[in-house]
Amino acid sequence: MNYTRSDLVLADAAMNQMRNAIYHLIRFMKRENIKDINMRLQRIGKNIASTYGRYWLPNSALTKENLVIILKDIYSTIFKSKINLEVDYEKKILKILDNKCSLCKYNYPDIDVPGCEVLQGFLPNFIDILNKKYPTEKIISVKRKEVSRSRAIGDSVCVQEFYISEK
Amino acid sequence: MGLLSWLIKKIGKSLGRNTKALFYTLLYREIFKEIYDIKKDLDKTVKIMRFIGGEASLESLKRQASILKFLPGEPDRVLKYFELIWTIVFGMELGEYEYEEVVEEGYPYPIIRVKIEKCPVCGGYGMDPEDTIDFNKLKASSGGMACGFIGMIEKVINYLLMTKKNDFRMKITEEKCYAKGDDILQFKIDIINIHDFKSKIPDTEDISYYDAEDEDRELMLESNEIKESILDKLRDKLDLDKIEELFDEPLNSIKENLSNLIRDKMHMDPGDFFDYFTNYESDIFRIIGYLGIHLLNEYGGLVEKYLSNKIFAKISGYIFQQIKETYKIFIPFDIIDDYHQLLLEFLRDLAPEEMVEKIKDFSPTDCTDLILEGTQMALEDLGIDFSELKENIWEELKRQKPTKEEYEIPSITSTKEEKGSVLIQIFQEILLLINALLSLPVRIILAREHESIKTTLKSTTSGGEVLESIKLHADRIVEFLEDIRS
């Protein structure tokens, strides 16, 4: 009897080789003269979120009150990452600082697109699915902005930036 | 799985960067989909995914090569650690699996099939709308969805064989795949010579930037460039396989090593070798003692150098004589008997049955006496002239008795010598008395130590509670460390 996805959502796996594989995929894309690598990585994240959201979600929609708790829960549960958050409600910008990003660890001089671009696609879609599952007033939605810093391109930390809006 | 394999698995898992397995699986699926989106050809996608897996693995291997150096370097022995390699690569348990060997005439190694019940890569594939690739459209010879994962494992094994300078490599193909509708994940492993390996690498014409031959050439070059440290050399001799044998069955391991030594150096079967000594069993014990000292001397000839000094040679001779005479007083019979039993256990399977039975009839102290006889012969070779030695060291210390003429001319000097001789005799008797008094407590201490070691070993091998306890506590430490890290 093979694993089901419900089994896999409970188990942990070592990410080291898959993390490396993302950068080999990027190299492959570059050699194939693919121009929209960022978009493709985001698409990967978006599709992962669509499937993942069917097997595990936090237990309430994202609101201003629980934003920190829910995002930390998502990162610690799925990516095993301890993150720090900076939220600027005036500028409507959310910054997620990850010192041990699961998709970036080493600096690759030949790479200019960080692997954690995947998360730019993952998080907005995942939050969308979450908010749809627990409809409530004043939910926060998240949209991709940019990966402003990444260990893969020589920074000491990965910083994911998103636009946030309250509905 | 032995304690060390288990420990390496734990270390490997805890050093790895974990995420939820579902995230891993979905990322794998999405990478595959992106390659397919670019190549628009499923069979080519499988090849590229396989190479990407291999490259990803190679990158980690180059960084963490030391953990693999404890694994053995022969293909058949490497496969014994398939489960461990799987866990290190994937960070998940292999689970239930079957292992099948097909021996083909003319090939040095059999073809191996591994049937795995749980495939983490395609677990649950086909249940969600994002699972858009239909793996049934793959050619039968192209493998399946686990291609990238196979690339990873194959590269780990071949990298290991390369670092161990082995001439064989493994070619792994995916014969059955859940995503293709099979009811199991099945790998076929061909163990082939490095020269044939190149010709069996999948056609890479379509893989624009991964050239398999170049990649393999790179592995070959690295093999020559590897600089071995002393630790590496030690690890070559003491790989995981051997260490675990020593832990699990120390006697069997020594037996095997001795058998190999007899085969290599004497070009004889161990049974034939021991057969030469049938009816000359006592000589075996003498040889053990004799060779023991000569082997000790092999380390820089230290014994010989030490004994080249006449005074040291005499002192050593007297100490040896003392041991020979007093070991029965100091060492309890039970201990000597235990070692006799151990020797019988050792010789069983190695020596002819008739010989083992005869040795069984020897008393344990007879055996020890014979070993000491052999030791004495070796010590004679290396510089101790036992014929020159007096009955004991005290006799040596006594001055030579005066001649008749000297007796007739009494002098102050001879009187002093006589007194000195008497004093030495008194001193000797006092020491012998102390020896006798000490023999009982020494026997008690030796017996107690011997018993405690025996009890510990028995409880470790029979109940396994100690082993389980070690695993339990180490498991908890790893869990705590993971908690701290997350």
Image (spheres, coloured by chain):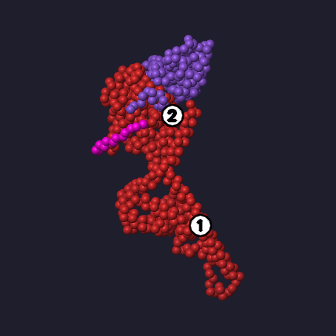
Report the amino acid beneath label 2: Gly
Q: Which chain is red?
A: B
Mark 2 / mark 1, whichever is N-terminal: 2
Q: Residue at x 49, y 44 (%)?
A: B4
Position in image of residue A19 (x %, y %): 48, 28
Q: Nearer the viewer, residue B48 or B205?
A: B48
Residue B194 visible? The answer is no
Q: Secondary structure at mark 2?
A: loop
Q: Residue at x 68, y 81 (%)?
A: B414
Q: Nearer the viewer, residue A147 or A167?
A: A167
Position in image of residue B13 (x %, y %): 50, 36
The answer to whether dots 2 and 1 both sit on one chain is yes
Q: Which chain is purple?
A: A
Question: Chain ID for label 1?
Answer: B
Q: Nearer the viewer, residue B349 or A51?
A: A51
Q: Are marks 2 and 1 in contact (CB under 8 Å)?
A: no
